[in-house]
Image: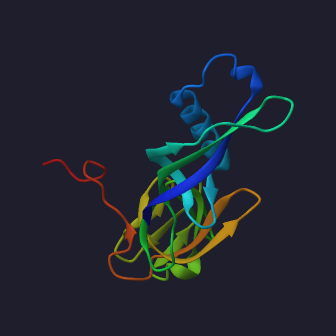
Amino acid sequence: MFFEVELQRDVKINATNLDKPVSRRFILACLLDNLFKEKASEDHGYFLAVTRLKSIGKGNVMDESGNTVFTVVFTCRTFKPFPGEELQGVVRYISQHGVLLKCGPIRNAFLSAWKMSKYQYIPGKKPAFLSNELSKIEKGVVVCFLVLAVRWINASRDFEMLASVDADSLGPVSLPGSDELEL
């Protein structure tokens, strides 16, 4: 789910960059760089975009080095998955145990073979899962799935999801121009 959240961060500017007045643009560039490194938080999800810069505080000199900290208040668009939510992901890996999907910034959404009961595993050079209705889940296919569980991994600052396609309207998504016949 997407959110618009108000956040506050301290942006540290090295003394070597303070030889001239610090512009708002430079502080914003440092903020964006810090958010890119932070990537996500357990509370808010993945940081996607700064949508509004609300305020930049006066710079406070930290110590004798001359480094200065600016407190920045801003709004940010975030993405955080929740159990019960329907999402779409692209298949990146297939094994007999299930499928790994990539969903936006989330690299690991696991769709267990147990959670796609209408599908049978087909081994080979290009492994896939095939249903009785001949819908196919293979590498590169977009799959609509239900989020069963979400876990935050603090070490990598990522979320992992457990997924299912055992419900109506879930499974491979037919995209315009992907595999339709031209008549």
Relative to 32, is 129 above or below?
below
Q: Residue at x 66, y 49 (%)?
A: 38
Q: Which residue is farthest top?
A: 19
Q: Residue furthest left?
A: 183
Q: Is residue 105 visible?
A: no
Q: Nearer the viewer, residue 82 or 42?
A: 42
Q: Quadrant of residue 77?
A: bottom left
Q: Is residue 54 left or right of residue 126?
A: left
Residue 104 location, x and y as percent? 49, 54
For this rendering, which residue is in front, 35 or 83? Answer: 35
* Lateral position of residue 168 relative to residue 2, left or right: left
Work out whether residue 172 or residue 128 is closer to the camera in this orientation and state it.
Answer: 172
Front residue (pair 10, 119): 10
Q: Which residue is painted at 49% across and 60% down in the image?
A: 79
Which x, y percent locates residue 153? 71, 65
Q: Residue 103: horizontal and vertical position, in percent?
A: 50, 58
The image quadrant where one finds the N terminus is bottom left
Q: Residue at x 31, y 50 (%)?
A: 178
Relative to 154, say whether 18 is above or below.
above
Question: With 84 as the anchor, is 162 left or right in this view?
Answer: right
- Which quadrant would residue 108 be assigned to in this image? bottom right
